[in-house]
Image: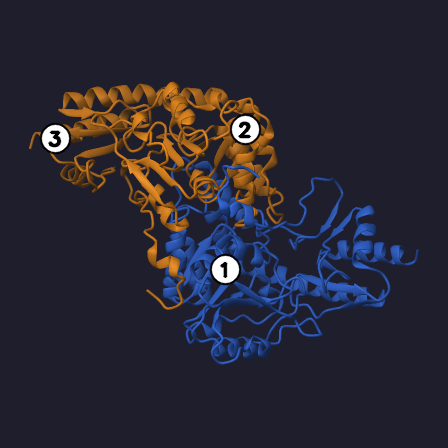
Chain colours: A blue, B orange
Amino acid sequence: MSQFWSPLVHRLSPYVPGEQPRVEGLIKLNTNELPFGPSPAVAGAIEAAAREGLQLYPDPQSGALCEALAAYHGMPRDHVFVGNGSDEVLAHAFAGLLKHDGQLLFPDITYSFYPTYCRLFGIAYETVPLDGAMQVNIEDYRRATGAIVGAVILPNPNAPTGVGLGLDAVERLLAMHAHAPVVIDEAYVDFGAQSALPLIARYPNLLIVRTLSKSRGLAGLRVGYALGQPHLIEALVRVKDSFNSYPLDRLAQAGALASLGDEDYFQQGCAAIIENRAQLVTGLERLGFAVLPSQANFVFARHSARGGAELAQALRAKKILVRHFNAPRIDPFLRITVGNGDQVSVLLQALEDILSC
Amino acid sequence: MSQFWSPLVHRLSPYVPGEQPRVEGLIKLNTNELPFGPSPAVAGAIEAAAREGLQLYPDPQSGALCEALAAYHGMPRDHVFVGNGSDEVLAHAFAGLLKHDGQLLFPDITYSFYPTYCRLFGIAYETVPLDGAMQVNIEDYRRATGAIVGAVILPNPNAPTGVGLGLDAVERLLAMHAHAPVVIDEAYVDFGAQSALPLIARYPNLLIVRTLSKSRGLAGLRVGYALGQPHLIEALVRVKDSFNSYPLDRLAQAGALASLGDEDYFQQGCAAIIENRAQLVTGLERLGFAVLPSQANFVFARHSARGGAELAQALRAKKILVRHFNAPRIDPFLRITVGNGDQVSVLLQALEDILSC
């Protein structure tokens, strides 16, 4: 508290990211990173960019990267916006598209940054409970005639549950709130979920947000992007150019471009995670966990007899980090990132040891 | 315009950065970059960071970098905040420290991003005219008893004039508005101006903002920082953690750290610019320009007979870019970045040719 703070600062409830500890030998399954690095082409591109031109400002529009993303997704250049991680893209979307007189709707259990953005930007919101199976039911987003919905944001697949929505369900949501912006946060879509990309041409209210942090193994590079019709992209550009003209440094632009150019590596990585996920789920179920059906690079699992906090702490004692949320409804669960084969085995063995005590 | 935009978006007036053209052979003296690259240690550090761990999130607090900056400036760690370029640091300062019931004061001629931030965050402001010599006169920031000043922001040296304020003047400002946050934007301080650093311990209302883009030749890396007492830093952290937890990627953190470790290179670079600036000023005055006394890596100069727009356009035809602002009071001026010796010579020769026509 300080007399010098803007009144805004007093009402904030800052987001708490998963731990990034610097401990040797830790198995880190708490922040949904890939267990392997990005395409080898990335380091080469970064090294070239580091050797020349660092004294010059980067392209403020990240033009080459936007063009590459547009080509990759088969869209015009003016359908693409990039930012310093999808968190920054989401922040601009909250400020520029999701603040209206009507309330913003999102699930009660979802990415915990959403209510934080709402407090930062003064956005009124209403959370919509997941159903009994911890799934988003689109019909729960319908409101009585006359009730004003300002906007909607949903991750697909949802976090921290990992549960995905079909394209038909997303389309019903877009049609249901045709006059409101609808943001689909596809941070984890590449691990088997259905993208809403095919709907962009027909739904002027649809903005998709993506990240290179997860499926492209570039969490350390901070690159996210949005896809949507140009009038939505323009709102993001206007906010960005009122906040920070140069959000992506030269190295991030170069590295992201190189990653996009290596499709084989990307596909193989996603396939490996999907395979490891199946092993992890089988192992967890064998140990007495109920695991929500995941389309992400993590699973959300609760044990039939032991609490989430207790298990997370016992794993930590064995130098394995998973994420536990001390929050209503999800307190019994662990969110476990899908690691490589060895990590999956070590985790399952550790849980077996803990559960046998 | 779009029905999907937040009402905010309609009132924005986005900042327009200097051009970043991709033209071969251009002499680029329009965005105040160094004419040479950063310390060679920077590329090495980035290459090491690119080869390992890019799939992992960066340290969200940039702890090692903050500690190095604290040690460099002889302050405790809790006096330091870092962001994605000083533009992001400024944005968080506007949101978290400069928005109050009273008006924000800044010069009428200054960094043109300030009014843009004000519109983004809904901050009421009043501009204070530079005096007849285009200098900040601190007495002009005094207000009648009862008039509420919310906060003050000043660049030192000012941009685009390059004119610096002495430490005594800055201290008078801090004492004059002891109950209001005062941000001193020291983006260009390393080229011969006096820093307000010695005042931090005694003035709880002082926040200093710095960048590695100018004097450290790292515009392409996007690293800025703030220094001040912990209660001010905490406001910035709270805003940052409500906006984007991971503003600096792994490469930027590594490169910035390496730059801080090479003091000799840094000092030599600043000295070279100061020397080249003297040559540029002498040459411009010989050609009939009046040049404001600059403590920055640029000069602000007006010709006795020819207009700023006309000269900027004539230089552009010779593939030399300088910055011209089509705005009241400064329309006759050119803002010219101090380049290397060759660039200074080529520019002066080009101006001589243009003026002889």
Circle 1: is it few (<14), some (14-19), or many (20+) Cα within 10 Å?
many
Work out which quarter of the rendered image holds the N terminus of chain A and state it. top right
How far across and how far down the image is residue A124, in percent? 51, 62
Residue in front for this viewpoint, A109 or A352: A109
Q: How far apart are the two marked residues, 3 and 2, measured between alpha carbons?
A: 46 Å
Q: In the visual, does A252 lie left or right of A14?
A: left
Q: What is the number of the mark on residue B353?
A: 3
Which residue is located at x 34 percent, y 27 percent? B157
Q: Secondary structure at mark 2?
A: helix
Q: Amino acid at mark 3?
A: Asp
The residue most toward the front is B146
Circle 3: is it few (<14), some (14-19), or many (20+) Cα within 10 Å?
few
The residue wearing badge 1 is A123
Question: Quick check: marks 3 and 1 in contact, CB under 8 Å?
Answer: no
Q: Is residue A279 above or below residue B134?
A: below
Q: Is residue B286 above or below residue A216?
A: above
Q: How far apart are the two marked residues, 2 and 1, measured between alpha carbons?
A: 36 Å
Q: Secondary structure at mark 3?
A: helix
Which residue is located at x 63 percent, y 49 percent? A16
Tell which subunit mark 3 falls on.
Answer: B
How far across and how far down the image is residue B202, in percent? 51, 22
Q: Decide if residue B338 is in sight here.
A: no
Q: In the visual, does B118 lie left or right of B204?
A: left
Q: What is the number of the mark on residue B69?
A: 2
Q: Amino acid at mark 2?
A: Leu
